Image (cartoon, rainbow, N blue to C red):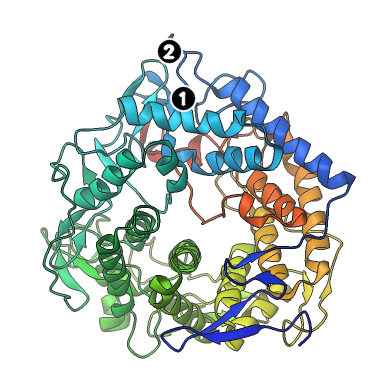
Amino acid sequence: MTSGENLVSLDHDGYRVTSDPGADHSSGTIVDGPGRDERDRERLSVVESYADRVLETGRDRWSGEETPLLVDGVHVDTHEPVVWQYEGEEFLVSNLASQQNLFRVLDGLSELTGDDRYGDAARDAVRYHFDHLVDESGLLRWGGHQFVDLGTLDPVGEFDADVHEFKCHFPYYDLLWDVDPDATRQFLRAVWEAHVLDWSTLDMNRHGEYGRDAGGEEPPWDREFADPDPFFVGEGLSFVNIGSDLVHAAGALHALGDEPDAWEWGERLAAMYVKARHPETGLGAYQYTKPRRRDEPPEDGPLPTTSNYGDRAENQFAGQFGDVAREGWVLWGGKIPTIYVQNGLVQLRLAERLGADGARLRRWTVDGLEALAEHGYAPAENEFRPMWADGTDLTGQTFDRSGYYGESGTAWQPVPADAEFLLVYALAYRLTGRERVWETVRAIARGLGIGELGATPGDEPTVATDVTGGQDGDANGDGTSDGGAAEIFALLELYRVTKRRGYLERGRNVADRIVEDRYHHGFFLPSADHVNAKFDAVEPLALLALDAVLRGEPDAVPPYVGGSGYVHGRFDGHGRTRDTRVIWPKTREE
C-alpha cells in the first residue's frame, strides 16, 4: 500500500471509515511532521505579535476595575474600543461569545510557544464571567442579543431583547471546562433548558429566557420524547443554526463530562433535521417545525416578514410552487452554507471526537453533503444551484411576490462553492472515504484554481503553488473575510488523508499571502482600509493550525469548528442590524 492510499475499516454501523497513513491509529492523530523553516517561524512570530497587540489594546482599561475582560475589537489607529450606539448612548462591546475563536488562538499559541500568558488571558476572562456574569440558572451573559458594557461591567440587552441567543456560535467548551467543570456542566444543561420549549417534541427556539429554573443540581434529561413527524406546528422556531449549537453543547457535555443522557438528546435533535429532509432527494432541512400562524397574512400585495404570520416561504411562494414551499425546504442564499458548512462542519468535528458514539451523526451529515453534491452542485461553474429541497432548480426564475425572502422580481442566484465548502467536503472524505465526496472535493479544488487532486487520493496531485486569488477582499461580506483561512484548513485535511507535501506547500503560500494581504497595524483585517479590528479573526487560527502540522503536533491547536459570534439589535441610524454590517465592514472611505 502506498503512502497516499486510504486505510479503510468498518465501524459498528457498517460505515466506511478512513484513517491517516502514517498515523497513530489509536488516537487518530498524525505523529510525524515535515518540519519548519525560517519563514514558518516568522509567520508564528506574526501571530505572537498579533496576540500581544490584542491583549495590550483590548484588555479592560475602561471600567476602573481592571478586569481581565476584553472588548470585541478596537479602532486600528486610536485603539479605542468599538461601540454599540443605542438611543444616544455608547456601549463598549465585550461579548464572550464573539471571542471564542480568539480564545482558541490564545490557547493554541501557548501550546506552541510555551508562553502561558496567552492561554491564561483567555481563562481569566472566562473565570470572570463564571464569577460575575451568569444568571441563577447558570446561563452566561453573552450571545447574539447580549453583551457586557466594559464601561460599567453591566450586561446590556435593551437594544433588542434580554434573551440568550445562539446561532452557530459553537463556543470553545474545552476551555470553559478547564476553567470550571461544574459551572460549564451547569451552563450546558441550562442552555438546553432555556431553549427547549417542549421536550416531548423538541419544539425549541433560538431565544432562551434568562432567569428560568434549570432544575438545580439535577440533570434535565429525564424527559419523555414522542419522536414526532417533521413540520408539526410549533411555538418556537427550530432553525438549524440554534439546533447546531444545542447538538454541539450536548456532545461537548458527553465528551467532557461523561454524560451519555445529554448526547442521547443531542442525537435526537440532530435526527429531527434528518427526518425533515425531502424524502426523495435527501436535501435539507433548515428547520423541522412550522411556526404557528397567529395572524392572517394579506391575500395579495407585499407580505409581512415576521413569523407570527406562519411559514414565510409558504406565504410567499406556495402560489408559485405549491406544497414544496416551506421554510424548512429553502435551499438558496445563506441557507445552503448554514445547513451544509456551519452545521456540517461542527457535526463532523463532533462526530470525530465522539468516536463510535458519533457514528450516526457522521453518517447523517455526510449523507446530506452527498445529496447536495448530487442534486445541487454544478462543477463547470463551481456553484450550488438555488433549489427547493425536492431538487427544483430555481436558477433564472424570479419571485412572484414580495415577502421575507425579498422583493417581487428578485432573481434566484447560485451560491459559489468557496473554500469553506472545500473544507467540509475534505473533512467528510477523511472521515468516510466516500468516492462521491472525493469527486466533489476534486471539482471544488479545480473551481478554486487549486489544481487537480487526482482520481484517487493516492494519486500525486498537481497543486498550484502560486496563490493568485481568493485571499483578498471580504469573502464574507461582513468585514471579517476568512476565505484564505478556510483553504488552509481544507489543505490540512487533504494532507492528513494523503501525506502529499504539495498541499502543505500551497498552505504555506496561502498563509504567506494572508500575512501580506491581511496583517495591517498589528491586526488581521480584510484590507488595509478597514478601521475596526475584530479580535475574533479566524486567520491566526489557520496559521497556528498549519504550524502545528508542520511540527507534527496537530492536536496542539484547537480545531476550527465553523463558529462565529455577532451582536444583533437596534443601532442608532440603522434600525435592527448587526455588528457585521455597521462595525466590522467600516473603511476609511466611510
The residue wearing badge 1 is 69
* Relative side of 153 to 323, left or right: right
Q: Quadrant of residue 250?
A: bottom left
The quarter of the rendered structure image containing the C terminus is top right
Residue 468 is situated, as x and y percent measured from the top left of the image, at 82, 59
The furthest residue to the right? 38
**Above or below, 344 relative to 542:** below
The mark closer to the camera, 1 or 2, is: 1
The residue wearing badge 2 is 63
In contact (CB < 8 Å): disc 1 and disc 2: yes
Residue at position x 56%, y 19% from top?
80
* Relative side of 340 to 444, left or right: left
Q: Nearer the viewer, residue 324 or 398?
A: 324
Q: Residues within 10 Å of mark 1 (few under 14, many from 20)?
A: many
Q: Quadrant of residue 435?
A: bottom right
The quarter of the rendered structure image containing the N terminus is bottom right
